[in-house]
Amino acid sequence: MSIACASYNQNSLKVNSRGELCSFTSGERELLWGGARPDSLKLRRDRVEGGWPHTAPVMFPLIGPPQREGDREFIELDGQQLRMPQHGFARKVDYNISRDGEHAIYAEYVSQGSPIRTLNGIIEFPFKHRLAKEFWIDDFSLNAAFSVVNTDERPLHFDMGWHPAFRPLRDGVIKCGKDTLSLSYILSKGTVLLPNSRQIVYSSPKYRIEVEHNFGNTWVWAQKLPSGEVPLICIEPVTGMPSFDSKPVGSWRTHSLSHGEATSFWATITPKAL
């Protein structure tokens, strides 16, 4: 798997061939879980058995779980069942990667609406579109932009989210407005939904990570391994809010684009030692 790198002063980032951000280093501190990095670049703590195999994938056109009947996973459109995995297919395809100067990396995926063949089966989303990501860094932050263009004659329905996984901070808590979420609370809930949120702060007595975005909502999720170890915590900007009732169903029709229309979303990650 190839890796593209960009740096600015004491900050650096890496993006893999799937267009997935797989590293953000501020000073000498790696902030992200390394599931999406090649084995040769993984740190010892990224190699725990059962750890999530991603770092910061994009969720598109579905966020959350698909509908399920037996072993089949799908979304429904106009009476059709389109095969679709959890969080959609954007993390399962290859992107055209390019550098935009020394400080930025651009990744683009162009779909002709053909079935997507993966090791786990076929994915169906028969709409032509372009999906692009750009990551760049400055003195203080990692910046991310995500855009969708509908190149199909039909309306394009979708939701989008970003799923960055952070290394846990010792005694860290999540703050959103007046709410403070401990790690034990997050683990007890599985996924915590924070509607109408644009700023999330993950902080400990010695470090602070601020996530700002314009997606509209935020999910928080942490992985707990059978050993009891918690190797990562995710702060996820999302456009929709799925149902996690007795029969969970994800969200994928919050946004709609006509032929030729485009839309974009952004997020920033700003770390700071205290």
Image (spheres, rainbow, N blue to C red):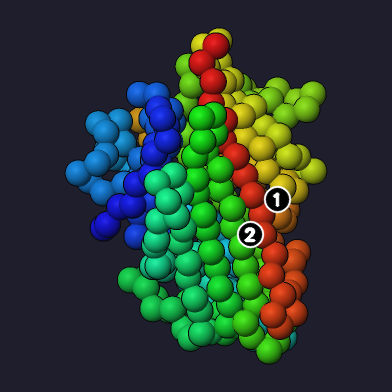
Q: Earlier in the sequence, mark 1 or mark 2?
A: 2
Q: Give the quadrant of residue 20.
A: bottom left
In the rendered image, residue 182, in percent from the top left (x then y), is placed at 62, 22
Image quarter in which the C terminus is found: top right
Q: In this view, does 88 lie to the left or right of 185?
A: left
Tag 1 secondary structure: loop
Residue type at mark 1 is: Phe
Please report the residue visible at 72 percent of the width from the left and 47 percent of the height from the top: 214
Q: In this view, does 199 lie to the left or right of 146?
A: right
Q: Which one is nearer the viewer's eye here, 90 or 189? A: 90
Q: Name the residue under label 1.
A: 215
Image quarter in which the N terminus is found: bottom left
Report the number of discs: 2
Please report the residue visible at 58 percent of the width from the left and 77 percent of the height from the top: 129
Assess disc 1: are there few (<14), some (14-19) or many (≥20) residues with their C-alpha within 10 Å of its C-alpha.
many
Please report the residue visible at 64 percent of the width from the left and 85 percent of the height from the top: 152
Alpha carbon distance from label 1 to label 2: 8 Å
Q: Mark 2 points at which residue?
A: 160
Residue type at mark 2 is: Met
Q: Can you say whether 90 is above or below 209 in the image? A: below
In the rendered image, residue 145, in percent from the top left (x then y), is placed at 59, 53
Assess disc 2: are there few (<14), some (14-19) or many (≥20) residues with their C-alpha within 10 Å of its C-alpha.
many
Dots 1 and 2: beta carbons under 8 Å? yes
Q: Is residue 212 left or right of residue 69?
A: right
Any part of residue 79 in sight: no
Q: Which one is nearer the viewer's eye here, 42 or 121? A: 42
